[in-house]
Image (cartoon, coloured by chain):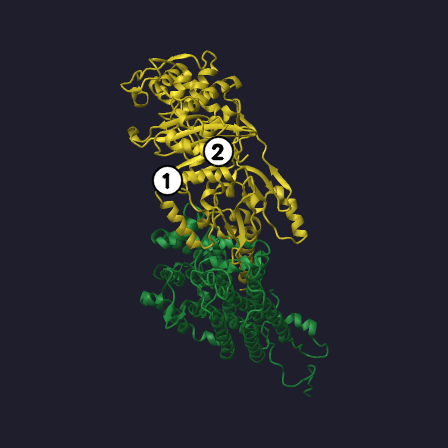
Chain colours: A green, B yellow
């Protein structure tokens, strides 16, 4: 992982008589992998139809054609705009996005056209179409980012603008009246007409870029050692400012928007970037301890936070399975009924779990694709994160390094928080599952992350400029 | 910076490994545990994916079957005779089950270990799995008569009829009852509404009075008291006992009187058989005080009381005869009052023990279990529960019980010729209940009779029925008649 990406290509594909080996762009690998991704999604889509009705789903051809057209467009854009980018990121994200569309269709069909089941909040009959439109917007933004950000360091210029933007986006739902911002007791969205936007999904991107820019500028100061305690170099007290501000912001998020998951995500993103920038373990410890202390205090001070802990610890006690732990235990029951090989798409009852289309979509996959399917999905996420971290290692300038590492870690943390939450590894907090959850904001933001990672990997793998003409071997110039 | 990134990669790896291990734990190792957790409707839904076995009566009448209705829950349970058999079948609802549906669930659902080999064969030969048929011991004639007569009485109560020789339950009816079809609906909200309505009903239709409710036995308990007296060896049916019309209870201001304060026969003394025939309270109170509470309790236990573990296969409520602290309460307990309570099943067991020459057979409801391939998987083996009395004592008690019906002065003399050619042996009970005994008296009757190779013991309790002979005996005799004359 630590090797510079170009080195392997140089040895494998280098031409002995050429002065500089040209690394391959690997766009053909990407195309082949995309074919694989589309085949997998088409197979899953057909599977839902056969599972539910014993025939191919109506409208499958149109949806799949739309999906393929979007991916071809994205692939062509990558060929043109980021030819050296990592070849796996786009196919991995496309597979997950496609599976999300398939699950949306599967849940949309519940109780419709004679299919069994009732959902507490049924999906509209156009949910799949809407999800494809979101995919189109997501891929549109993906291409736009690749087109606009030709050089990652350009973003560094807008460090403070992005920071301001992120804070405004974050604070917006808290400032708006509850009638247009509250959902399930958390103030995290903005309702505009029939659409809802979750600004935090974009805020985390803006803040991520802003953090990276800030840390590049200040990392020398931040890595200065202060006192030494139990073998750990503590930072100087006067340098604690930024981490305290991030901590305070994440706590405010927790208190005013009742959103523990996102709060953990921001804190994690900031601390991870701080750690990459300074290599100081003390920052990790300080950040972690601050977050745990804040969360503990919040669980004592705010009923809904404490309740989450109680649900986590005792989901099956007394009336809990029928009360506040209903959603969690239904998700667990669904996964249990899926077992090792699952019920098959369309064969389970994922609709019994409230909000299965968003926060609990992982349990729906666990129920219908089983442990094997769910592990495969987790590995897809794991691969995306791994590609991100590899990019971070390969890329040279500090800003890109911090940004790639931070984004990859945030993605990993998001997967950990939501999948760990619904599988009762950690207390449940409502955040979206990237690419799989039904809904637009998260999908679009996830595609922007992929675009940024691809841009960064393109920079990392791009060969240095070739000399204009072959000047031959170094010559001895006779001056006499 | 790469050192930090490498460390972070390890942290990310640990996070993903934790997730993967947890998913493995949940979906490979914890499934069984989660399947049995409360409120897991998916586990119940899985039961409705294939045909559950039938429940039939001994004579082959289907009283519960599964019909294919499509949908998430493919099969719906149907109870063709609804409330009549509800106390026996119970119900198989989406989230829970009762009665035989619950007790024999592993056979009906087809997942019993005894069916495992057949299930594997079915899987290989690609036959759909079907549950085993559970055949009950109930006789459809006796059951139908019991149910119709109970319903006609309009009072809450229950009838249980036993085969005294085997313990097979021939009839088990409870009124008011419920229609299990209402709880077999596959629509959750509808099921909840139906269930709530039944739960709230003050008539308690869900209560199986035949085995799950207890009532004071009243004078029918004199069977136990006289059994205890005869078993001591000093007394026989002709033994004279003190039987005043009114008895001052020791260490108490209360006086015990016979029904309406009548004398017992001709004077202050009577033979035990006369006291039994006329059901004199004072005579048996005296016998009970002489025997002592421990002796009575021991005999009651041999008849099946104080047993918390009886199952038919559903658990049966315990019939109680606690040790009484003093003579006055012992006197009352000897005539089936004070703290004595019995199930209607226990009433039938009193008679069944006498009818079977003093040996009490363990009551059972399931005759046999037949797998879908028609092979017999399990079959009832009649077993003796206990021997409360010797055959000689049983003969003496039987003589007294015959006298109750056949002697013109007996409390159930009205039924001496109720079934032509059949001699009925019985004992009436008119049990006081309620606070300060201000409730309406429960009518109790226990009896047995035989004809040809058929015999039957019946216990009937009618709440607020008044005299045993008036409200309970006609139903008991009707059930006897229906069974014996159809032999």
Helix, strand or loop under label 1 = loop
Same subunit, labels 2 and 1: the answer reads: yes
Q: Residue A281: which disc?
A: none
Report the front residue among B271 and B384.
B271
* Residue depicted at 46% across the width and 11% down the height: B234
Q: Residue B154: which disc?
A: 1
* Residue depicted at 42% across the width and 17% down the height: B273
Report the front residue among B70 and B54.
B54
Instruction: Write down the quadrant of residue A213 in the picture.
Output: bottom left
Q: Residue furthest right?
A: A17
Helix, strand or loop under label 2 = helix
Residue B174 percent across, percent down from the top left: 43, 38
Residue A417 percent across, percent down from the top left: 47, 58
Chain of the residue where label 1 is placed in the rendered structure: B
Residue A155 percent across, percent down from the top left: 46, 75
Placement of B286 over or under B436, stated as above or below? above
Query: Which quarter of the rendering shows the C terminus of chain A?
Result: bottom right
Residue B157 percent across, percent down from the top left: 40, 36
Disc nearest the viewer among 2 and 1: 2
In this view of the protein, can residue B22 be seen by the observer? no
**Residues under numbered marks 2 and 1 in contact, where contact means CB atoms less than 8 Å apart:** no
Query: Which quarter of the rendering shows the N terminus of chain A?
Result: bottom right
Question: Which residue is tagged 2?
Answer: B481
Instruction: Write down the quadrant of residue A196 in the picture.
Output: bottom left
Q: Specify few, some or many for label 2: CA neighbours under 10 Å numbering under 14, 14-19, or 20 or more.
A: many
Placement of A153 over or under A338, stated as above or below? below
Q: Earlier in the sequence, mark 2 or mark 1?
A: 1
Instruction: Write down the quadrant of residue A305 in the picture.
Output: bottom left
Disc 2 and disc 1: Cα gap in Å? 21 Å
């Amino acid at each position: 992982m630590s090797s510079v990406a170009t080195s392997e290509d140089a040895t494998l594909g280098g031409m002995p008589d050429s002065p500089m080996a040209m690394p391959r762009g690997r766009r053909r690998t990407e195309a082949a992998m995309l074919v694989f991704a589309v085949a997998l999604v088409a197979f899953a889509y057909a599977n839902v139809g056969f599972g539910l009705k014993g025939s191919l789903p109506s409208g499958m051809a149109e949806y799949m054609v739309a999906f393929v057209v979007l991916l071809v467009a994205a692939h062509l854009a990558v060929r043109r705009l980021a030819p050296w980018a990592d070849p796996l990121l786009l196919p991995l994200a496309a597979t997950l996005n496609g599976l999300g569309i398939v699950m949306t269709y599967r849940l949309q069909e519940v109780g419709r056209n004679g299919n069994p089941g009732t959902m507490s909040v049924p999906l509209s009959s156009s949910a799949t179409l809407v999800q494809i439109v979101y995919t189109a917007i997501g891929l549109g933004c993906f291409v736009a980012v690749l087109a606009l950000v030709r050089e990652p360091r350009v973003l560094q210029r807008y460090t403070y603008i992005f920071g301001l933007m992120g804070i405004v986006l974050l604070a917006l739902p808290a400032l708006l009246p509850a009638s247009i911002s509250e959902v399930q007791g958390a103030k995290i969205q903005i309702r505009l007409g029939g659409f809802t936007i979750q600004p935090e999904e974009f805020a985390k991107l803006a803040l991520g870029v802003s953090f990276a820019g800030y840390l590049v500028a200040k990392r020398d100061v931040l890595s200065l050692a202060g006192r030494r305690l139990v073998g750990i170099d503590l930072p100087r007290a006067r340098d604690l400012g930024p981490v305290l501000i991030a901590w305070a912001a994440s706590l405010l998020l927790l208190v005013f928007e009742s959103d523990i998951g996102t709060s953990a995500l921001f804190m994690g993103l900031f601390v991870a970037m701080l750690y990459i920038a300074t290599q100081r373990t003390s920052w990790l410890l300080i950040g972690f301890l601050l977050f745990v202390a804040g969360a503990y205090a919040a669980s004592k001070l705010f009923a809904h936070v404490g309740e989450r802990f109680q649900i986590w610890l005792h989901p099956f006690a007394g009336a809990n399975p029928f009360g506040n732990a209903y959603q969690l235990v239904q998700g667990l029951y669904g996964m249990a009924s899926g077992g090792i090989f699952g019920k098959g798409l369309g064969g389970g009852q994922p609709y019994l779990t409230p909000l299965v289309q968003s926060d609990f979509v992982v349990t729906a996959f666990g129920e219908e694709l089983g442990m094997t399917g769910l592990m495969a999905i987790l590995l897809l996420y794991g691969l995306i994160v791994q590609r991100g971290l590899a990019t971070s290692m390969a890329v040279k300038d500090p800003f890109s390094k911090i940004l790639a590492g931070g984004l990859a870690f945030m993605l990993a943390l998001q997967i950990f928080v939501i999948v760990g939450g619904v599988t009762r590894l950690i207390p449940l907090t409502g955040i979206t599952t990237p690419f799989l959850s039904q809904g637009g904001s998260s999908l679009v933001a996830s595609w922007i992350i992929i675009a940024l990672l691809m841009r960064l990997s393109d920079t990392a793998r791009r060969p240095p400029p070739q000399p204009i003409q072959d000047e031959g071997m170094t010559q001895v110039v006779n001056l006499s | 910076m790469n050192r930090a990134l490498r460390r972070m990669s390890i942290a990310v790896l640990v996070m993903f490994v934790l997730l993967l291990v947890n998913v493995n734990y949940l979906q490979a190792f914890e499934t069984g545990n989660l399947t049995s957790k409360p409120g897991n409707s998916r586990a119940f839904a899985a039961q409705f994916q294939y045909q559950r076995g039938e429940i039939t009566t001994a004579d082959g009448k289907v009283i519960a079957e599964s019909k294919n209705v499509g949908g998430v829950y493919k099969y719906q349970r149907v109870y063709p005779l609804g409330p009549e058999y509800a106390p026996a079948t119970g119900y198989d609802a989406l989230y829970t089950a009762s009665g035989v549906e619950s007790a024999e669930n592993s056979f009906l659902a087809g997942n019993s270990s005894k069916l495992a080999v057949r299930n594997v064969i079915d899987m290989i030969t690609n036959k759909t799995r079907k549950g085993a048929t559970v055949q009950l011991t109930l006789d459809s004639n006796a059951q139908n008569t019991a149910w119709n007569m109970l319903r006609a009485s309009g009072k809450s109560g229950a009838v249980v009829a036993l085969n005294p020789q085997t313990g097979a339950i021939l009839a088990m009816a409870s009124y008011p009852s419920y229609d299990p079809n209402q709880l077999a609906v596959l629509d959750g909200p509808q099921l909840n509404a139906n269930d709530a309505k039944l739960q709230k009903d003050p008539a308690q239709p869900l209560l199986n009075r035949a085995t799950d409710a207890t009532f004071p036995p009243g004078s029918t308990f004199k069977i136990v008291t006289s059994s205890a007296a005869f078993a001591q060896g000093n007394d026989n049916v002709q033994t004279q006992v003190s039987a005043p019309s009114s008895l001052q209870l020791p260490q108490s201001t209360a006086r015990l009187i016979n029904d309406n304060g009548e004398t017992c026969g001709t004077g202050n003394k009577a033979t035990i058989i006369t006291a039994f025939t006329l059901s004199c309270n004072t005579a048996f109170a005296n016998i009970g005080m002489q025997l002592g509470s421990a002796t009575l309790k021991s005999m009651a236990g041999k008849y099946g009381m104080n047993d918390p573990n009886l199952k038919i296969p559903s658990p049966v409520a315990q019939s109680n005869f606690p040790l009484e602290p003093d003579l006055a309460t012992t006197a009352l307990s000897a005539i089936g009052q004070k703290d004595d309570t019995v199930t209607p099943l226990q009433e039938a067991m009193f008679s069944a023990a006498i009818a079977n020459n003093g040996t009490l057979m363990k009551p059972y409801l399931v005759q046999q279990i037949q797998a879908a391939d028609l092979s017999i998987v399990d079959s009832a083996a009649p077993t003796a529960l206990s021997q409360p009395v010797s055959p000689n004592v049983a003969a003496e008690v039987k003589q007294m019980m015959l006298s109750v019906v056949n002697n013109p002065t007996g409390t159930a003399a009205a039924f001496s010729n109720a079934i032509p050619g059949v001699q009925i042996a019985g004992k009436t009970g008119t049990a006081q209940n309620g606070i300060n005994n201000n409730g309406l008296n429960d009518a109790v009757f226990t009896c047995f009779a035989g004809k040809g190779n058929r015999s039957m013991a019946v216990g009937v309790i009618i709440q607020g029925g008044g005299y045993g002979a008036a409200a309970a005996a006609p139903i008991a005799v009707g059930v006897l008649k229906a069974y014996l004359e159809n032999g």
